[in-house]
């Protein structure tokens, strides 16, 4: 943990649970941010003392004011600054002098307005660092903590939300007001609600770590517009998910904005930065959401109901059509329909009319009243094969909507199995939906909409069981050797490594290279070729030559020492003729590549997430079909196998119709090792292994050509 | 048009616009179908006379009843039968006797309850045919016509919907009640609303044709659980779309149910019937929807606003975050962001504060009141580059929500450009949303949700312009020749054609086959091979031999007449040795296939949609990647090109990195011709051309091997 992070970790507790709060820069004007914020914090009945600081007023709403924060006679835990940006810095300085450690800066007019604002924002940071203060903002809506031990509404939101287990963090302030309004109407409660604005000091990463240990929070929702520290975000999310088992849902906007810089190599031209964001989130176990609705559809299912113990659902409906549509959606989401036991079938037969469908999805038929619903729900809840229950209702003239809603809530209390509901329609079903929401039964406008959230939750919980047991292979690499090669190249101001050194680098990290030598004389060439064993290939090594083949600098299929000598001479003659000015450093001899399947591995740098590994099958698959997969480094062997299988062409490695199974295992190990090289040496800006030859299962794989750019 | 279809066409007008209606089997019991249906039709104030028919009552709600329908002294246009199924048939018979032509049978207890019910349902059909009657149902919710000239509510729905331009047809009755409730809450109006249940007589196809000419209907929504006549549905939808330019939206459930029968050939094993349904809908121009929400999201955008003249949108928001999310969604949906003119930019600059974003998406900033929204909307509406306007609002404390809603409605009236809105949140924005809905401004809970509907509408209208101009190539085929080949094979009880006949069949339909002969003697073989020109191939023709190659029945690369004689003898010797009992019919000689790209064409039968054409690239692309595309036959050349381009591997035909461009044009022509063969000869149950060799552009393509199963 960095020094600032540990400062934040302490101060965040004070931000959420202050014993005393100063509202710095407030006034009496209703409908303005400085005015409303004081009203809000007062109305929420804070569990602590409130000190309005207002140079122009003696009191506000009967509460005594102070001219400056330093005038407050008692100690102050938290300052909420609402002054115009012009005087914010001075106010923050005074907070530091007063010994305040926790600050929320609501005021706008900083980074978001350009250069001048950015400068002021950097000054805020300097002041905070000087006094070991931490601040949220600037340019934000504020912070809400519904915990009765705090009841803090340090925000200019219209509403104080209900208490709940969902934490919501947002980079956009305006979105927060929409979310609060949406949540209030649906009786969705929050534990902590934070608009963190420009995140000049406290970032989403600090907030994630805080929420990891927050007892009120069961699930974390985060809206992000910009990822400044991708590696940090990944690490924080992984820690939260694995240590506290809390799902982290992120909605990240800017999907279609073109990536920052287009790199020249394959890797560069194929990876859009949003694609990398997708990949990184998946690696971290983050659930990426497309919109607010998807986010809350998952959140209410997770926050309000027990975790489904299996992926098998029971569907109960009074309308066949929606039952079929929900079945379709369940299967598409990767869920299964539960198969009822004989007891269940018997129980359903007894309590439902003859025309009802007692198979899953259960159709209690249009004229069903609450008694049929109760019977069907009880039967499904007690069936061992049922992991969760989805109840669908359409408003027929005889449907006793409110009673059914109430009975669902009762059943939910009685059994430790999740139940979700969809009362279709809008006007007639409104009161029933309200009853469901009051009792924390997750309700969905369309029954189909419950399936994806349910599958997401189920998969999340399953992955917690398996992903923790990641086999971290005990790898040791010759870091020093690589370091000296790279340092000496950098000292010589070289932008890329000659092939024999590039091969050496990856060899030191355990990648399977073909046996090779670097020679300078004809005799040496013959002897070394003999040592390697025939056939061998020879390549000219020269910093002046880019396209070795075109100048006759490559000879393949050398079968004897005599051949080796001839090849040595031929390379020198041809190169000298084609490029008389080129300096030949020597000749690189390597065992000839055996036949196998060609794949490509690559490393590139993502501006947000750092080193990224690429994999794809060679030839048309990368060139024409762009059939590649990515991972943020490092990559475990298991993850490497998933990465390989993600490409469509991986079927060609798996052994299909006439094609033998290839050595995917050794390929995955190579990917793992390469990913560690990428992490250990950030000075490698691009690395291409093209091609790597994968042999049949058990026979390994070999790097045939490699390129490292610094 | 069939005889029944023309009967229905006349009677449907009477069903929707009756001058007199008999409710056959009604009673006084509230909360029951027979009771409610009379109340509903009475309450809706029908523009006509209502006659309750009830054997047990003298009057209902003060209206005189009749014991039997035949007792009514006046002529009756429409009968609505609500008797139990046991007496329905008798009631229908009496309706026939009374001269009633139009009937709605609400009663359940027919096909849906099994064999016995199906029998009763078939009887209903016989009675209807006898009297030239048409009926909707049985087992349905009924029919609603909101047109003031009718105001018919012959249904047991709780609500009479608002008047509007949307027609809704549903196979599920229960779904209808949910839809009506949903629509009422959102002020969505309907022109016609039909629950057609078991569609024993009048089907969705008849209803589509009726709605094609219905002036009240602008767009048609259809929920289907089962497609009984796929070809008819496609034809009807195409007619409606092309003749009346009304969009047809279909939601079809049962996506995941496995296809009926798994055929043995490639085509069969790859085509799931839901995939064919997708393909068929797309060919017909039908917009397939996943759920009710998607359907109405499109319907309100189309029904209530003008058609966008371009795909360029302007986004106006008071919150940056949702603006970015909507931009993402717009681009993903295939729309573009409009580029504002200098005038627009100037106008925005003048009326918005300095901190506002005057580029698209326009951010009027959180504290915006109606004046800023008006200025921005007017600027966008008058900009020539803007095709449509999306207005986003989040409820900040100063936002005058209702006024802004009202101003959007005013702007919409003033300009001939579509405007859509999203007021985010729920409780605070409710009154604003209501104002928007009252003024028919399409409203979406999430601003992102407007993008797909908008793109769908735009693409639909664009396709009307282009798809109508389908070049129907003037093809003429030798139908008689094919007919005689197929008939004679069928007469001989053959289940497949020998290769030389299969080749002849496709040749008669203009498919490019390699020059070939069928010979019986060695000398003939030599002469004919010479006529064809070398190299040629020879294959044994024998009904007893399936795997020709394995028994030495194929010789390739024959270079001279001498070689041809040797090959002829060799085939006979080897086959006689391997299968002494096999009868050799003769030898098939063909020009040897030139080198090119291998593709596969196929024909199979879909139980709903009839002959289906398959296309894919040979080798791994079909075998391992299942990279194939389908179309319902017939297929125009243009459609065939789209079909080819739909496969990922088609990139290999288009000319990419080192691979020459292949003759896609002649391939598309071959697909077109093959599709006509499939339509003209339904007795062909399967046809495989595997492979077809496509040569470089301008050099054509050739069938290398073909198989026809009867």
Image (cartoon, coloured by chain):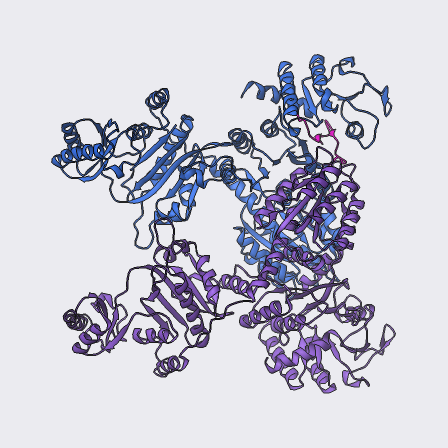
Chain colours: A purple, B blue
Q: Quadrant of the C terminus of chain B?
A: top left
Q: Quadrant of residue A220?
A: bottom right
Dominant SS of magenta comes to loop
Q: Is residue B661 above or below residue B252?
A: below
Q: Position of residue A55 (x, y in %)?
A: 79, 80
Q: Nearer the viewer, residue A103 or A60?
A: A103
Give the left or right position of residue B182, taking residue A559 as reference.
right
So how many labels did they put on this image? 0
Please name whichever residue, B24 or B330, is drawn nearer the observer in this view of the structure: B24
x then y, percent, for residue B616: 39, 43
| Quarter where residue A229 is shown | bottom right
Q: Quadrant of residue B140?
A: top right
Is residue B125 positioned above or below B458 on the image? above
- A311 in the magenta segment: no
Relative to residue B653, is residue B188 drawn left or right? right
Instruction: Answer left or right for B126 relative to B158.
Output: left
Range covered by the magenta-colored residues: B136-161
Q: Is B253 rendered above or below residue A502?
A: above
| Image position of A505 with respect to A670: above or below | below
**Which of the pair B659/A6 is nearer the observer?**
A6
Q: Position of residue A644 (x, y in %)?
A: 44, 60
Q: Position of residue B471 (x, y in %)?
A: 41, 34
Residue B152 belongs to magenta span: yes
Q: Is residue B649 visible?
A: yes
Query: From where the camera sits, is residue B589 visible?
Result: no
Of A177 and B509, the residue lying toward us: B509
């Amino acid at each position: 943990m960095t020094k600032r992070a540990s400062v934040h970790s302490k101060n965040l507790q004070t931000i959420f649970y202050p014993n005393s709060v100063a509202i710095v820069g407030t006034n009496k004007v209703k409908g303005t941010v400085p005015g409303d914020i004081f009203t809000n914090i007062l109305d929420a009945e804070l569990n602590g003392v409130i000190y309005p600081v207002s140079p122009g007023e003696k009191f506000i709403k009967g509460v005594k004011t102070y001219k400056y924060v330093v005038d407050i006679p008692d100690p102050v835990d938290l300052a909420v600054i609402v002054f115009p940006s012009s005087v914010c810095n001075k106010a923050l300085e005074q907070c530091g002098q007063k010994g305040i450690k926790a600050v929320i800066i609501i005021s706008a007019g900083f980074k978001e307005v350009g250069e001048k604002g950015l400068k002021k924002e950097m000054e805020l940071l300097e002041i905070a660092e000087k006094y070991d203060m931490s601040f949220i903002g600037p340019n934000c809506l504020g912070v809400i903590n519904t915990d009765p031990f705090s009841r803090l509404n340090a925000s200019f939101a219209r509403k104080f939300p209900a208490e709940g287990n969902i934490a919501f963090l947002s980079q956009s302030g305006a979105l927060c007001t929409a979310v609060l309004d949406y949540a209030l109407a649906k009786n969705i409660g929050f534990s902590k609600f934070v608009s963190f604005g420009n995140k000049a000091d406290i970032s989403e990463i600090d907030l994630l770590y805080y929420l990891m240990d927050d007892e009120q929070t069961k699930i974390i929702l985060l809206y992000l517009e910009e990822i400044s520290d991708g590696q940090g975000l990944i690490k924080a999310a992984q820690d939260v998910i694995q240590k506290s088992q809390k799902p982290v849902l992120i909605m990240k906007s800017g999907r279609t904005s073109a990536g920052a810089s287009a790199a020249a190599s394959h890797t560069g031209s194929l990876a859009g930065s949003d694609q990398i964001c997708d990949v990184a989130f998946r690696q971290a176990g983050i659930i990426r959401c497309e919109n607010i609705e998807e986010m809350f559809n998952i959140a209410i299912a997770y926050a309000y109901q027990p975790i489904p113990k299996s992926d098998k659902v029971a569907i109960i409906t009074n309308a066949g059509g929606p039952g079929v549509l929900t079945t379709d959606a369940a299967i598409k989401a990767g869920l299964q329909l539960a198969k009822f036991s004989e007891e269940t079938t018997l129980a359903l037969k007894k309590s439902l009319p003859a025309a009802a469908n007692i198979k899953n999805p259960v159709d209690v038929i249009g004229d069903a009243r609450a008694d049929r619903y109760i019977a069907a729900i009880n039967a499904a809840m007690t069936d061992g094969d049922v992991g969760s229950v989805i109840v669908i209702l359409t408003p027929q003239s005889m449907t006793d909507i409110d009673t059914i809603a109430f009975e669902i809530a009762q059943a939910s209390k009685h059994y430790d199995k999740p139940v979700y509901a969809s009362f279709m329609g809008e006007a007639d079903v409104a009161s029933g939906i309200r009853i469901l929401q009051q009792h924390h039964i997750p309700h969905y406008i369309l029954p189909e909409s419950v399936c994806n959230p349910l599958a997401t939750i189920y998969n999340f919980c399953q992955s917690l069981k398996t992903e923790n047991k990641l086999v971290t292979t005990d790898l040791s690499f010759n870091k020093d050797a690589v370091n000296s090669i790279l340092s000496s190249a950098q000292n010589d101001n070289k932008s890329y490594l000659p092939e024999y050194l590039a091969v050496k680098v990856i060899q030191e990290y355990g990648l399977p290279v073909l046996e090779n030598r670097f020679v300078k004389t004809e005799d040496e060439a013959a002897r070394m070729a003999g040592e390697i064993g025939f056939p061998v290939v020879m390549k000219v090594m020269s910093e002046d030559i880019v396209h070795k083949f075109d100048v006759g600098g490559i000879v393949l299929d050398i079968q004897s020492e005599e051949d080796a000598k001839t090849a040595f001479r031929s390379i020198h003659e041809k190169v000298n003729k084609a490029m008389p000015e080129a300096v030949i450093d020597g000749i690189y001899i390597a065992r000839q590549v055996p036949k196998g399947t060609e794949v490509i591995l690559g490393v590139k740098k993502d501006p947000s997430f750092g080193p990224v590994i690429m994999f794809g099958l060679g030839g048309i698959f990368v060139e024409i079909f762009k059939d590649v997969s990515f991972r943020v480094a490092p990559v475990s062997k298991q993850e490497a196998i998933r990465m390989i299988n993600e490409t469509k062409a991986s079927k060609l490695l798996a052994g299909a119709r006439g094609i033998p199974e290839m050595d995917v295992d050794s390929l995955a190990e190579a990917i793992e090792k390469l990913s560690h090289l990428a992490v250990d040496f950030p000075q490698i800006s691009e690395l291409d292994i093209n091609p790597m030859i994968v042999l049949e299962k058990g026979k390994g794989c070999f790097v045939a050509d490699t390129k490292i750019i610094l």
